[in-house]
Image (cartoon, rainbow, N blue to C red):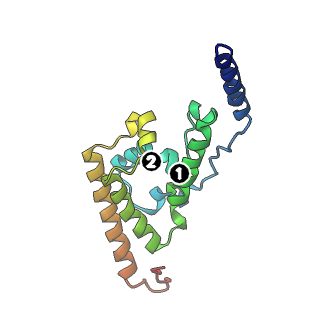
Amino acid sequence: MKKLLPRALMVLGFLFVVAQLIRPERTNPASDPARAVHARLAVPAEVSAVFERACRDCHSNQTRWPWYSHVAPVSWLVVDDVNHGRRHVNLSEWASYGHTEADEILDEICEEISDGGMPLRSYRWMHPEARLSQADVRLLCDWSRKQRQRLAESVAQPPAKGETPPTAD
């Protein structure tokens, strides 16, 4: 029994070292600022500040990769969370969303933060500054409602002479 523990620790250490060889790709794709949410919607400074501290790392192409994102097996989870977050909504690629999809995302932003689903609990644990106060939640929900209203109005307005009408997707 006394020999089993040191051997088990050696095997675990070996597996940990081997796991470091399996390196997921941490990417920050090039971004065109003209395609970002800030270029497409009115984003006040206080909303932008909340996006910066609580949303940017998983929902944009400007992820700040912390030290633990380089250590397996945590790195696998972090990269998966970021990739999933970007697929779900990417603030750096807002121009790729049509009116309907943008409306749904804006609605979902309020829903997710109101019920505490976002930011993820694991992210908040490692990044306490990402925790949203009730004031943050109200701010983002009010902002998303206003943007949804503006989006609906832009679809409802007839196009100016010579312009192509917006589509509802």
Name the kind of residue labelled 2 in the image.
Cys
Residue at the limit of the structure toward the front, as seen here:
1
- Residue 165 at what x, y percent from top left? 47, 83
| Badge 1 amino acid | Ser
Q: Dividing the picture into quarters, in which one does residue 14 lie?
A: top right
Q: Marks 1 and 2: in contact by CB < 8 Å? A: yes
| Residue nearest the viewer, comparing 63 with 167 | 63
* Residue 34: quarter of image: bottom right
- Dot 2 or dot 1: first in sequence order is 2
Residue at x 70%, y 34% (from the top left corner): 19
Image spot of residue 81 (x, y percent): 54, 48
Mark number for residue 55? 2
Q: Residue at x 64, y 51 (%)?
A: 30
Q: Quadrant of residue 13?
A: top right
Q: Is residue 41 left or right of residue 145?
A: right
Classify 94 as above or below 162: above
Left or right of 141, for residue 7: right
Question: Which quadrant holds the N terminus?
Answer: top right
Residue underneath mark 1:
60
SS type, badge 1:
loop
Q: How many labels does the image show?
A: 2
